[in-house]
Amino acid sequence: MNPYVLTILLSSLGLGTVLTFASSHWLLAWMGLEINTLAIIPIMAQQHHPRAIEATTKYFLTQATAAAMILFASTTNAWLMGEWEIHQLSHPLATTTVMLALALKLGLAPVHFWLPEVLQGLELTTGLILSTWQKLAPFALMIQVTPTINSPLLVAIGLLSTLVGGWGGLNQTQLRKILAYSSIAHLGWMVLILQFAPSLTLLSLSLYIIMTSSAFLTLKTNNALTINTLATSWTKSPTLAALAALVLLSLGGLPPLSGFMPKWLILQELTKQGLPLSATLAAMTALLSLYFYLRLCYALTLTIYPNTLTATAPWRLNFTMITLPLSIITILALGLLPLTPAVTAMLTL
């Protein structure tokens, strides 16, 4: 893609997200979401491949449907209640419709079916943008409308997303689909705690973006798209393979890695709010996610390259990619747990 065109598209992507962040009116927020969607579509379709075109079409249809639902809900609220402000969303029909539309935009269960298929058809860099940056604008809207949304609905969507994210990734061999189900599970944890402690949701979202960025950049550096090719990556860079295993365990939420911090604090807050059953179910579904992370770690570090593999053996050549961002993000993805007391002190301010 032409660098000037790519610069314009990335600038539009940032503009759409910032516009949604800064808006207090539903029409401005809707315009920001539309600019965001229209800016990423050419980036997704830059690979002239049937899978990329199919993924782009699916993404466009789902995002257009969600945007239409948001416009319908905000218009309904303005018609019945006379308010266009995001904070003044008060009619039950409008609040429920907006919640389902934002769930569709984020890929939360039970409207998650598009996310693994779309992510599977994209290259890893575009998949990284879709899994991280594209979550920010819908989450900003969801945080603003949470006080008006039915509490059991949020808890149900959160628990269902953690279950689907863990269950769906068990039988996958494609790494992009595994990361898509991982995204669904992490978003479920964020929605689960959203109404009780929005600051914890922001903490979880920040750590999710750090860990997912590290995972995607590691896979891109190793040029690995399936578990079989992941098993050969230790021949190219043993150090990176060892760090990738730790990043995957951090995504699974094992101590003493950074991914343990949000799960620990969320379970603690759910128990404080008198929801021990929800906390137990969320912890049980986290075990499902941990299983496929351990499966990836096993393939990455504990298996030897099989002779019957049809893939070509990788050459051990010097890296030409810039690895500084990967190094910084990997350090953050692994070593933030000791900062938990400082984080909790900041959250209580």
Image: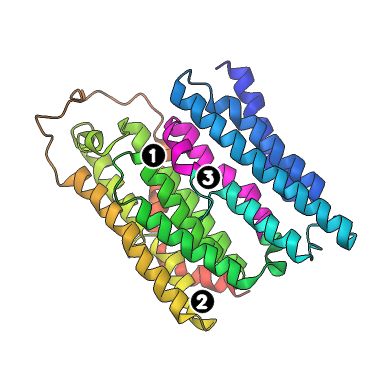
Q: Is residue 45 above or below residue 88?
A: above
Q: Residues within 10 Å of mark 3 (few under 14, many from 20)?
A: some
Residue in view at x 60 percent, y 75 percent: 348
Q: Which residue is mark 3?
A: 132
Q: Which residue is mark 1?
A: 176
Q: Residues within 10 Å of mark 1 (few under 14, many from 20)?
A: many
Location of residue 255 by image quarter:
bottom left
Q: Residue furthest right?
A: 82
Magenta span includes 138: yes
Residue 342: x, y in percent? 51, 69
Mark 3: secondary structure: loop
* Horizontal side, residue 281 vs residue 239: left or right: right
Magenta segment range?
Answer: 114-142
Residue 139, labelled with which disc?
none
Q: Residues within 10 Å of mark 2 (few under 14, many from 20)?
A: some
Q: Quadrant of the N terminus?
A: top right
Location of residue 28 by image quarter:
top right
Residue depth check, mark 1 versus mark 2: number of the one nearer the observer: 1
Mark 2: secondary structure: helix
Q: Tell me how far mark 1 sits from mark 2, CA to CA.
A: 32 Å
Q: Please tell me which of labels 1 and 2 falls first in the chain.
A: 1
Residue 269, labelled with which disc?
2
Residue in view at x 66 percent, y 37 percent: 36
Residue 221: x, y in percent? 34, 32
Q: Amino acid at mark 2?
A: Glu
